[in-house]
Image (cartoon, rainbow, N blue to C red):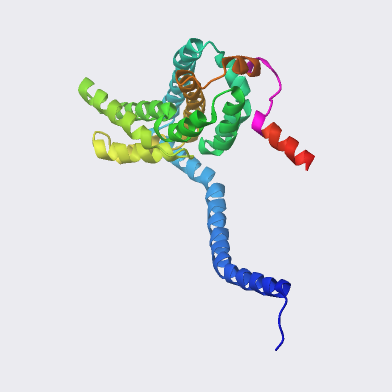
Amino acid sequence: MAHTSPTTTITLRYHRLRDRAVRYTDPIKALSDVVFRIVGWVMRLAPLGTFGALATVVATYGAESRKQLGYLIILFTATCIVYVLVVLGAIMRACRLSLFGLIRFLKAELLVALNTCSSEAVLPQLVRKLEILGIGRPVVGIVIPSGFSFNLDGSAVYLTMASLFLAQAMGIDLSWQQQLAMVGVMMLTSKGTAGIAGGAFIVLASTVTAVGHIPLAALSLIVGIDRILNEGRVFINVLGNAVATIAIGKWENDFDTEQARKVLHSRTITPPQDELDTTKVGADK
């Protein structure tokens, strides 16, 4: 009776496990290819859909509607600037740090968020940058992921301003009580907004339907400029969560202020100490 060597046995088991794994991975891979192809079609057709929506608004309400949409963009941008300079600036001054230094430090992440209109796209980079800034890893690991679900200040600004604009555009006279109630509902629903492109628009549609003061068809008025409004929304979301992490880090005494000042005033980014140690160990090996 022939005996197989241990190496041959291990090789046979490896091939059996590989063949068994292929049975499960091949269908998943095929499904992912289909999904990504559909996403590619949607991305190619999205500009045409936006153009069609804006053309429908202009054809229905006239060229004067473009001026009103321009006013909304200007007012929303001004509101975002005031919020960043006044609210976030006051928090950073209380932490004795520079707001513009933080913006310069997070420039790459903010640009990626603006281009993708998604705050989730910069989650890993933002966590790494805040650890470099001197905030403890437990604070960053808890505040940033939870903040992208519950601390979406930009989404709250977007939802409230968009809903009030739609009410005025449709000629609906809301009382102060109705306006405050709508703002309160929008602030609550913004806490569940997904950090993906277009997520706030879906929340706006569902909230408008639930409140009932504004017809759902009115949302077609702002479809054409939703991308522009999303850029300001995502910018505030990312920057606001970074500032919130700094504030909570100081509150929990898990923040190195001197390290933060050194990083914000320097032009180069130094990796965290644990990454330096890992690199050194790898080099020693």
Is 51 situated above or below 230? below
Tell me the quarter of the image containing the C terminus: top right
* Image position of 94 (left or right of 9): left
Residue 19 found in image quarter:
bottom right
**Where's residue 252, x and y in %?**
46, 21
Q: Residue at x 52, y 50 (%)?
A: 42
Tell me the quarter of the image containing the N terminus: bottom right
* Image position of 37 (left or right of 207): right
Residue 273 inside the magenta-drawn segment: yes
**Where's residue 266, x and y in %?**
69, 17
Residue 238 inside the magenta-drawn segment: no
Q: Residue furthest right?
A: 284
**Where's residue 153, x and y in %?**
42, 26
Q: Nearer the viewer, residue 170 or 82?
A: 82
Q: How many marks?
A: 0
Residue 78 visible? no
Please state the extent of the stretch shown in magenta in the rendering.
264-274
